[in-house]
Amino acid sequence: MGRLTLSQEELASLYQRHFRTVYQICLMLMKNVPDAEDAAQTVFRKAMEQGGPFRDPEHEKAWLIVTARNECRNQLKHWWRTRRADSGALDSLVWEQPQDQEVWDQVAALPKPHRLVLYLHYYQGYATGEIAEMLGENPSTVRSRLVQARKKLKLKLEEEGYGPS
């Protein structure tokens, strides 16, 4: 059995290493900044309460990704959220490369299962087998979603004038 809580130093280190990833997943799923910030904060609170131990850095990152996805799902299912208007798009997401913003807008418009698989594969560098394990999905389902996501993204980008000239 693991420890009951992380020390302040351990939590600060965990936060610094993984906040960007957790926040981007939350923003991608919640589609607005305030809700994404709340969800990300809740993920790190759960990490503090869970207290580890993680087998290795990849287990730590995978746990945070799955917890972020589950937290967002839970918040999106909440009864009051289904009666509330969507308050905005992904306007403040900052990627390492600013030119990605227009592409990200198209990624963000994809259906949720496609968005998450595409993000984890291309932005986080996970293989489809790793994504399947994290999400509790069949690897062939993940590969299929990735193929579908690529096709949809390609069509959307071509409509916006991207692609070979």
Image (spheres, grey):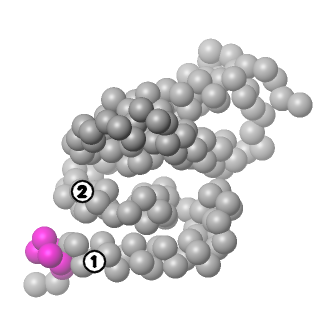
Q: Is residue 37 above or below residue 145?
A: above
Q: Which residues are magenta?
A: 158-163
Q: Residue 88 at x, y = what percent?
A: 23, 41
Task: Answer with left or right where residue 4 lies relative to residue 99.
Answer: right
Q: Residue 23 at x, y = what percent?
A: 43, 38
Q: Identity of the amino acid at label 2?
A: Asp
Q: Identity of the amino acid at label 1?
A: Lys
Of residue 97 and residue 64, the one placed in the foreground of this image is: 64
Q: Residue 148 at x, y = what percent?
A: 42, 78
Task: Answer with left or right where residue 152 lies relative to residue 61.
Answer: left
* Quarter the N terminus occupies: top right
Instruction: Determine the residue located farthest toward the top in the rendered image.
Output: 8
User: What's the mark number on residue 105?
Assistant: 2
Instruction: Determine the residue located farthest toward the right in the rendered image.
Output: 1
Find residue 85 and report its image quarter: top left
Is 160 covered by the magenta stretch?
Answer: yes
Lower position in the chain sequence, tag 1 or tag 2: 2
Task: Answer with left or right where residue 1 lies relative to residue 162.
Answer: right
Report helix, strand or loop for mark 2.
helix
Q: Residue 39 at x, y = what percent?
A: 47, 33
Q: Residues within 10 Å of mark 1 (few under 14, many from 20)?
A: some
User: What's the mark number on residue 59?
Assistant: none
C-alpha span from label 1 to label 2: 13 Å
Q: Is residue 45 above or below residue 105?
A: above
Question: What residue does disc 1 label?
Answer: 154
Q: Is residue 94 visible?
A: no
Say which residue appears at 11% left-offset and 74% top-offset.
161
Say which residue appears at 49% left-offset and 36% top-offset.
78
Task: Answer with left or right where residue 118 lies relative to residue 48.
Answer: left
Say which residue appears at 38% left-offset and 63% top-offset.
111
Q: Is residue 86 above or below residue 114?
A: above
